[in-house]
Amino acid sequence: MNQNAHTAEESPVRLERDRKQVLLYLPPSPTVDAINDWRELWQNLKHHLHASERFWESQTLVALKAQDRLLDMPQLSAIAQALSEVDLRLSSVETSRRQTAVAAATAGYSVIQPSPLSPLNQPVAAHQFKHREPLYLKTTVRSGMEIRHDGTALLCGDVNPGGSVIAHGDIIIWGRLRGIAHAGVKGDRGARIMCLQMQPTQLRIADVVARAPNSPPQDQQAEIAYVAAAGIRITRGLDFLKTHRFVKEQEIWEAFPI
């Protein structure tokens, strides 16, 4: 990987080149005075973008590394505008804050929520991702847009062709799945993909891959994809419940807390 850091004076904002994209790092979120901190960050960002050596080509994509910083849609829009002034285009947001992830997805950017680390800086075990707080989004995942979450992802909307949802836990889509869904990405073959209308470009659960059937479903009923002995199987939601009665009610409450 070829990375070259470009800094303007002693700036808390950093720009780095990573292959064909630019990485924009923001400083950690302040503990107090968030309003003044945003103003200072905004001024610093503008100065840094215009003072830095332009090592990018026209319309290069930018991956925003927001860390734990809380950003709303107007602030994300302001960052995107500042980038456009120097011929850069914001494409994705990596954040550990759920509110920032929701705002970014609503604005149409790809979202990445990094895996948490233990006190010893070791990745959390794959089975623990099921118990992390679900990510709930109310948006349409358009072509070129990607949603990543380290737990269960719940989407109220459609996933269009060219869009993708990737989760370490289950994927639940209250809409049409016509793009890519990858559940149990860290190796959990017990993960499931559920949606109201299943017409995916590709389904993946852990390391098992399946493509959409040649003909669309005849009846519009909620369907569930899960790993069986012969690979990924898709069945109607009601049929799945009848044949999988071993699922404990407690597990359902844990997946859908009130």
Image: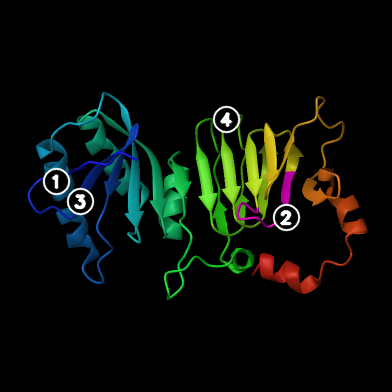
Residue in the foreground of this view, choosing between 9 and 87: 9
In terms of sequence position, does the residue under pointer 3 or pointer 4 come before the other? 3
Query: Identity of the amino acid at label 4?
Result: Gly
Marks 4 and 1 sit apart, C-alpha to C-alpha, by: 35 Å
Left or right: 74 in relation to 215: left
Single out the mark in the foreground, 4 or 1. Answer: 1
Distance between the Cα atoms at labels 1 and 2?
Answer: 44 Å
Nearer to us: label 3 or label 2: 2
Secondary structure mostly seen in the magenta stretch: loop
Disc 1 designates what residue?
7
- Name which of mark 1 and mark 2 comes first in the sequence: 1
Real-space CA distance between mark 4 and mark 2, rounded to the nearest whole angstrom: 24 Å
Asked whether the beta carbons under mark 1 and mark 3 sit within 8 Å of each other, the answer is no
Q: Could you say whether the residue bearing mark 1 is in a helix, strand or loop?
A: loop
- Residue 148 lies, in percent from the top left, at 52, 49
Which residue is found at the position 68% from the left and 43% from the top? Answer: 204
- The residue that mark 4 highlights is 162
Say whether residue 115 is magenta.
Answer: no
Residue 209: image location, x then y, percent: 71, 40
- What is the spatial separation of the Cα atoms under label 3 and label 2, in whole angstroms? 40 Å
Q: Is residue 192 magenta?
A: yes
Residue position for label 2? 189
Residue 56 circle label: none
**Which residue is painted at 40% across and 50% down in the image?**
94
User: Which segment did they paint magenta?
Assistant: 184-195
- Amino acid beneath label 2: Arg
Helix, strand or loop at label 2? It is loop
* Cα–Cα gap, marks 3 and 4: 32 Å
Q: Which badge, 4 or 1, comes first in the chain's sequence? A: 1
